[in-house]
Amino acid sequence: MNADAFWERVNAALDQRRDPLADPLVQRELEGSPDRFGELERLLRAASKLERAPQPARVRRTAAALIAVAAGAAALLTLRHLQSAADRPTEHVADAAQASTGAADFAPSAPPGFVLQPCIALLELRATFTHRTADEIREVQIDALSDSSSREVHRRAVEGSAIAFSVATIRTSQLQP
Amino acid sequence: MPSNARPADDPPPTLEARLSAEAPALRAFLGRIAGESAARQHVDDLAQETLARALRYRNAFDERRPVGAWLRGVALRVLIDHRARHARSPESFDAELHEPRAPAVDPFEQRDELERLLAPLAKVERDVLLRFHTAGQSIEEIAAALAMPAGTVKSHLHRARRKIAERGRDRRDTK
């Protein structure tokens, strides 16, 4: 059997997803020309590696799913941080309301250990959260497209009619440690 | 009736007995494949491992087929596995023959290895090879996906395999 006939036999077995090593003709040829064993061995090891390799389409699907999950997780964490930032400056709002009944801009100081990360992955995210309590309505507007990461609007009802109104704009750059 | 024929009411020989009868031919076969340089002890160890593996996977043996061809197929697999382990850790040659280790599964290492493997192939050869061996597509499915005749797919596939098989030989020749 010449080399071409040998490889034809090997390829025919592989094409039918059979083990070429189980073919008596291949065995006989290997016994007569042991130098061919190295080549066949290399091919079979390569085929085995290829069969164990992840499928390209599966890799793409997995990567897309992981990115989606990571983006979702990042969005959730960011929103929770922003909500917690919105909750914490209420004392400042109350103080501001006591000091002045008009609108006042202020930049609340970041609570210790609080770091608001820029939302690079959330460029399309715009959301408004409204939190109502017995005497207060708080709105948190989040716009990842603008320089400011969130805008808070606090309304405080005083004896049912008077309104104290504050607007706070949190800039991510100011919250970096 | 020939003198060596088995009477009809005799129980058929067990697989163990048939394997034992094949052992000398198996050693000779392994000796020729492993090469003249292979030590006798090494060949004996490989033969023992082959017999042990054959018994371990006895359910895969079709009793209607000759045991010798099946055993030689197992022996070639044992030899390939043994060489792969030996290439990874030459110092533990004997120990690993009896206690084989699982291959490394570092995904980055695997990806690099795959890239090296496919490097000498043309784009269409690489595509066909990956579709057949990795994605598990049939020749006909690949032909339909790539809009080419099945014969052309086979040609690309066979050429790709041949290139991979002969690559190491080329590298050895240039050393």
Image (cartoon, grey):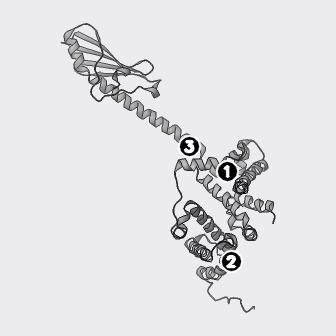
From the top left corner, tell me how far across and down residue B163 is, in percent: 73, 52
- From the image, which quarter does the C terminus of chain B lie in? bottom right
Q: Which residue is mark 2?
A: B28
Disc 2 marks which amino acid? Answer: Ala
Disc 1 marks which amino acid? Answer: Phe
Q: Is residue B66 above or below residue A133?
A: below
Q: Which mark is residue A147?
A: none
Cα distance between the residues tagged 1 and 2: 36 Å
Which residue is drawn at the image coordinates 59% and 80% (left, top)? B16
Q: Is residue A85 above or below residue A155?
A: below
Cα distance between the residues tagged 1 and 3: 17 Å
Q: For this view, does B78 lie left or right of residue B104?
A: right
- Residue ranking furthest to the front: B175
Q: For this view, does A68 lie left or right of residue A109?
A: right
Foreground residue among A125 and B162: B162
Q: Secondary structure at mark 2?
A: helix
Q: Quadrant of residue A59?
A: top right
Foreground residue among B90 and B123: B90
Verify CB contact (< 8 Å) between mark 3 and mark 2.
no
Which residue is drawn at the image coordinates 30% and 16% (left, top)? A107
Q: Please, which chain is the residue tagged with disc 1 on?
A: B
Which of marks 2 and 1 precedes in the sequence? 2
Residue B65 in sight here:
no
- Residue ranking furthest to the top: A102
Q: Secondary structure at mark 1?
A: helix
